Amino acid sequence: MASPKTIALDAMGGDHGPEVVISGAALSLERQPALSFIMYGQQPRIDAVLAQHPALRAKSRVIHTDHIISMNEKPSQALRRGKGSSMWLPLEAVKAGEADAAVSAGNTGALMAIAKLVLRPMAGIERPAIAALWPTVNSECIVLDVGANIGATASQLADFSLMGAAMARAVFHIERPSVGLLNVGTEEMKGNEDVKAAHALLKSVDVLPLEYKGFVEGDQIGQGAVDVVVVEGFAGNIALKTAEGTAKQIGSYIRAAMTSSIVSKIGAFLAQGGFRVLKEKMDPRRVNGGTFLGLNGIAVKSHGGTDAFGFASAVDLAYEMADSGLIARLTADIDGFHHRLSAAAAGGSRPHDTTGSMLGKA
C-alpha cells in the first residue's frame, strides 16, 4: 500500500506559475491520495487557484514568499540572492525532513545550483546528474546525464550508472536494471578514453546492483535496448533536444500528410483511433520531469512550459522515488561499489592499465 508522502512545490516556477503547478498537483493527488503538499510562493495567487480544488486545498499548506527566481536568472545570481525564494524553500524543506521531495518548473541552472548547495552531493559522488525518462518502443528508459555536466570522467560515468539503476528500480520496479554506455559504436575500441575506461571499470567489478550491457548507440535508445543509458551531459542534452525536435517534426509530417487531400482526410478519420494511440505515446508530458540524482534528497525539475498534465507527471515521479526509498538504496549502492573498487585496487586484481588507473582514482 502506498505510504503517505509530502511534496514541496515551487508554486511560482515555470512559465505559468500557480495556475499550472496547483492544477497539476490536483491531478497527481487523484492518482496518489496519500500525497500532501507544501506550496511556496505568493499566497494570494496560490489561494485563488487552490479554491478551485477543494480536495487539494485540504491536503496542502501554503508558505508565503514574494521572492521568486526568474527564468532567465543566472545560477550565480540565484545562489547569491535566492535564499528565501519559492525555489529555495522547498529544497530546505527536503533537507529538514519536512518534505520527502521537491518539485519545481523554474530555471534549470538555478535549481541545480541551489539544490547542490542546500542538499549537498552524496558521499562519494563528485557530480550530480540530471536523469530523464525517455519513451521507447516497449515502454520507457532512463537517460543521464542530460545537461548537468559538460564532460565526465570514467569514475563519474560509473557513478551515473549506479544512480540511473537506482532510479530504474524505483520507477520501473526492476531489481537488476540493464545499463549501457552511449557511444559512437558497440565495438570495444571505439569511443573516447573516458568512455572506454568507464566500460572497463564497470566490467571490472563482479557484483553490481545492475546488469551492465556494454556500449549502445544512439538509435538503440528508442529501441529500449537497455533500461538505463549513461552519457556525459553535453552529448546527453543534445540527444534529448534532438529527440524532442524529431518527434515534433514527425508529428508535423503526419498532420500535413493527413490533410493534403480529401482521400487523406477520409483515411485520417478512419484511422483516428490509431493516431490517438500514437499521439499518446509521443506525448512528452507523460515523461515530464528531470531528476537531480546524486544529492542527499529528491529534487525533480519539470519543464517550464508544460501544462497541468505534464506537471502532474513530474509530481508522480517525485512520489514514486520517495516511496521507493531511493536515497537510502542509492547511498548503499555507491558505498558498496566504491568499497569493491578500493578492494580491487589494493589487491591488484585487474591488471589492465586503463582500468587500474581508474581504480586508483575511485
Image (spheres, rainbow, N blue to C red):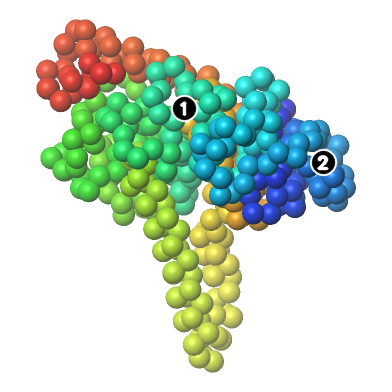
Q: Residues within 10 Å of mark 1 (few under 14, many from 20)?
A: many
Mark 1 → mark 2, Cα distance in angstroms: 32 Å
Residue at left offset 63%, top offset 49%: 14
Q: Which residue is mark 1?
A: 294
Q: Nearer the viewer, residue 23 or 320?
A: 23
Please give the count of numbered marks on the rendered protein. Answer: 2
Q: Secondary structure at mark 1?
A: loop
The mark that comes first in sequence, 1 or 2, is 2
Q: Residues within 10 Å of mark 2 (few under 14, many from 20)?
A: some
Tell us which disc is closer to us: 1 or 2: 2
Looking at this view, name the residue that lies furthest to the bottom.
262
Q: Is residue 191 visible?
A: yes
Q: Is residue 165 visible?
A: no
**In the image, residue 153 lies at what x, y percent?**
28, 31
Q: Amino acid at mark 1?
A: Gly
**In the image, residue 41 lies at what x, y percent?**
75, 40
Quarter placement of the N terminus: top right
The correct choice, above or below, for 53 with respect to 88 in the image is below
Q: Is residue 176 left or right of residue 106?
A: left
Residue at left offset 55%, top offset 59%: 283
Q: Place residue 77 in its image quadrant.
A: top right
Q: Amino acid at mark 2?
A: Gln
Q: Is residue 4 left or right of residue 57?
A: left
Q: Which residue is mark 2?
A: 43
Q: Secondary structure at mark 2?
A: helix
Q: Is residue 203 left or right of residue 175?
A: left
The correct choice, above or below, for 93 with respect to 312 in the image is above
Disc ID at residue 30: none
The correct choice, above or below, for 100 with respect to 305 in the image is above
Q: Place residue 362 in its image quadrant.
A: top left
